[in-house]
Amino acid sequence: MDSFDLFNIALDGYSALLCAMMGAQALVAARGRRDEVSRCFAGICLANTVMALGDITSWAPAPPLDQGQYVLVVAGSFAYYAAVMPLYLFFTGYIVSYLERRTQLAPAVRRAIPPLLGVLFVAYSACCVASLWNGMLFVVTPEAGYERGSLFWISQASVIALHLFNAVIILRHFGSLTAAERLGFASYLLLPMVANAMQVAMFGVALLNAAITVVLLIIFISIQSERKALLARREQELAETRADIMLSQIQPHFLYNTLTAIREMCLSDPTEAARMVTDFSAYLRENMASLTSREPIPFERELRHACTYLALEQKRFGDRLRVEFDVRATAFSLPPLSLQALAENAVRHGVTKREEGGRVRVASTEEPDAFVVTVADDGVGFEPDAVGLDGRLHVGIANVSARVEALCGGALVVDSTLGAGTRATLRIPKGEGAGGGAGSGRGGE
């Protein structure tokens, strides 16, 4: 074993150690959170750790190999090749998860991801397993050690296709990234491709794993650290705006009007007045409880609160306010005062703005990857570009959107047509709360 082999072993070993440490830190950071970005980052680190450790076997036992060395090299070669596709699948998952928190992914990209990744993973994994018998990707013999297989180019083509697909995703959404984020993703696009080209052209240079490690380090510093600071700022902002959220939900006019309605009901129907007092106290109690709530609450609890609010408003507006429910899914959680806030917007800024009133419809459904809650009304509607003209409407929607994203990783979409009504859709993801040149071949080729 010459000094150059020792250098490659040291380079692979250091890459494996550094990736293992970064991956462990990312998993610790993601513990107890709906943080697919950190989990995918940890997956990238783990896959590159396996690749680097597998690559060491192409340097350490020099041929001819005894039985133990032969088994070691076969295992290392298989581990190296088998980890290539998961590495780039985790890169794809990281990119998609990261971008989804910043912008809306293009529909064509969203549709193409599952079938493409599934086909690539199954086909490539089958080639890796088959190589243990037919040597299509790699061959290990006691006499020569590790060598490229006759169909080695398949490993190149597969990951180049995935790398280019990832590059398309990044470039299509490049404008939504900050300068630090662009640096991190640009390093992913360029460094593995350059290292892979050099590794293929220069036999015996372990550049690929080192280049991926550098990419991960850049991403870790420029993106992961920035995300950690962003999460800290968001938590601080949520704490500072809890009082504002409360005030946006308990407006003086609602209190005055409800108390007036109760007073009038006492004269005409004391029994109904007693029920209104019970509903009103429940409404106030739930609002006060939400002031200190830091976690999502069960949907059924939030639905009861929204029902209480709508029942009080129906007492006030009578036949002018009609309410419908179509609840088909309840086994999920969402931020407190989110559904109630949307219901209040539908009443205050929708149906009650029309002299004849209108209908508010609350629905929940379950999709394969998310729970969806909608609050629709057939009120006056508004011009989406003019939401900011009504400060309270804007603040209420913004607060719900910010809390759903921060606490559940979800999103709020509001569609409205002037004169036809408004539809607010909450999407709560399921779960608590997977490219080019990088797969080319081993450093020891």
Image: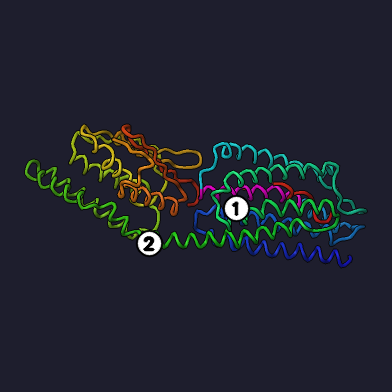
Q: Nearer the viewer, mark 2 or mark 1?
A: 2
Colour setting: rainbow
Q: Is residue 62 magenta?
A: no
Q: Quadrant of residue 43?
A: bottom right
Q: Secondary structure at mark 1?
A: helix
Percent of width and height locating residue 280: 20, 49
Q: Which mark is residue 40?
A: 1
> In the rendered structure, which disc, 2 or 1, sits on the residue that comes first in sequence?
1
Q: Position of residue 410 (x, y in %)?
A: 45, 47
The residue lying at 38 percent from left, 50 percent from top is 398
| SS assignment at label 2 | helix
Name the residue type under label 1: Cys
State which quarter of the image contains the N terminus: bottom right
Residue 186 position in % (x across, y down): 65, 53
- In-image side of 49 versus 361 (left or right): right
Residue 212 locus on image (x, y percent): 70, 56
Nearer to me, 169 or 93: 169
| The residue positioned farthest toward the left in the image shown | 267
Left or right of 421: which side holds 167? right
Say which of 70 and 385 sits in front: 385
* Up/down of 23 relative to 177, above or below: below
Residue marked by disc 2: 239
Residue found 33% across the figure and 38% down from its top: 382
Q: What is the CA distance from the residue labelled 2 to the residue labelled 1? A: 28 Å
- In the foreground, 253 or 47: 253
Residue interval drawn in magenta: 80-102
The residue shown at (69%, 40%) is 120
Q: Residues within 10 Å of mark 1 (few under 14, many from 20)?
A: many
Q: Residue at x 28, y 38 (%)?
A: 350
Q: Kindly identify the amino acid type of the residue bearing the numbered disc 2.
A: Ala
Residue count near mark 2 (Cα–Cα under 10 Å), binned few <14, some 14–19, many ≥20: some
